[in-house]
Image (cartoon, rainbow, N blue to C red):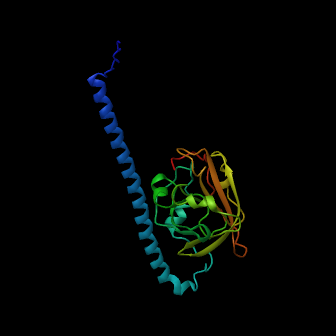
């Protein structure tokens, strides 16, 4: 009885070497990516903790002057913030300079709480919720527009519901909003940033929440301020033409 021997195929030594180094390379890239993600998350948490502590200390020092923390009226904002409010955005991804926190957003029903910075560039959104320059500031008449990444500060927005209460707390006072609607729009639908005669709040993040890569849509929350009629606006700036481009969050 004859047996036919199986032929064994051998890869060239050079090919084996390339495969081995390829595995090492991908492993190294994976470790570096995880390390960067961990560093970014740690940096954001430390920044939020530090700024929240400073903000609470500042509020405590101001509390005797503003009573129970409710807004005392529409006191003027610092000059730097007033100037930042007139910077026009060209897209959902870009904005002006990063500044000291404008305040803090809290939505207790979904467990969201974060400090707010001026601007929506990547560095800002990595550390905080961003305020769109050219839109109203908290407590002013008009449309206060805020942006956040869907996988960090605004990840909980997937659970928001109509009539949920949103609080914007600033050194100028505390302002409560009630959610009126949510919707999904295309990045080019920039009407959500338009100014308004009413005091409203607009929250924007990428959508779908579980999408991997640059998300194709935007999730928008619209809320209205819970307070008496506001004074009329006088020459407030509006954002210029925008394109709601995707990001990596």
The answer to whether residue 15 is above or below residue 223 is above
Give the image location of residue 43, x and y in percent: 40, 60
Residue at 55% x, 71% y is 77
Residue at 35% x, 47% y is 32
Give the image location of residue 121, x and y in percent: 49, 53
Give the image location of residue 11, x and y in percent: 31, 22
Residue 73 placement: quadrant: bottom right
Residue at 52% x, 55% y is 151
The answer to whether residue 227 is above or below residue 44 is below
Q: Is residue 30 visible?
A: yes
Give the image location of residue 95, x and y in percent: 52, 53
How many numbered tags mark residues here? 0
For the N terminus, the image quarter is top left
Residue at 65% x, 56% y is 220
List the single residue furthest toward the front. Answer: 1
Nearest to the observer: residue 16 or residue 225: 16
Residue 111 placement: quadrant: bottom right
List the single residue furthest toward the top. Answer: 2
The answer to whether residue 57 is above or below residue 47 is below
Residue 13 placement: quadrant: top left
Q: Is residue 193 visible?
A: no
């Amino acid at each position: 009885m004859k047996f036919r021997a199986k032929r064994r195929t051998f890869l060239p030594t050079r090919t084996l070497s390339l495969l081995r180094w390829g595995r090492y390379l991908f492993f190294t890239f994976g470790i570096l990516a995880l390390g960067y993600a961990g560093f970014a998350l740690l940096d954001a948490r430390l920044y939020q903790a530090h700024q929240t502590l400073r903000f609470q200390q500042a509020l405590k020092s101001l509390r005797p002057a503003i009573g129970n923390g409710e807004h005392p009226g529409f006191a003027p904002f610092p000059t730097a913030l007033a100037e930042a409010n007139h910077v026009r955005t060209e897209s959902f991804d870009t904005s002006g300079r990063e500044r000291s926190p404008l305040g803090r957003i809290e939505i207790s029903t979904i467990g969201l709480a974060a400090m707010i910075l001026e601007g929506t560039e990547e560095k800002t959104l990595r550390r905080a919720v961003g305020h769109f320059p050219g839109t109203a500031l908290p407590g002013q008449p008009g449309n206060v527009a805020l942006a956040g990444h869907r996988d960090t500060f605004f990840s909980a927005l997937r659970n928001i519901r109509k009539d949920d209460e949103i609080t914007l707390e600033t050194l100028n006072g505390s302002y409560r909003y009630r959610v009126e609607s949510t919707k999904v729009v295309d990045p080019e639908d920039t009407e959500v940033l338009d100014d308004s005669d009413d005091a409203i709040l607009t929250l924007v993040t990428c959508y779908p929440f579980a999408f991997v890569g640059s998300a194709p849509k935007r999730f928008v929350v619209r809320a209205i301020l819970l307070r008496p009629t506001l004074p009329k606006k006088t020459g407030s700036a509006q954002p210029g033409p925008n394109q709601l481009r995707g990001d990596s969050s």
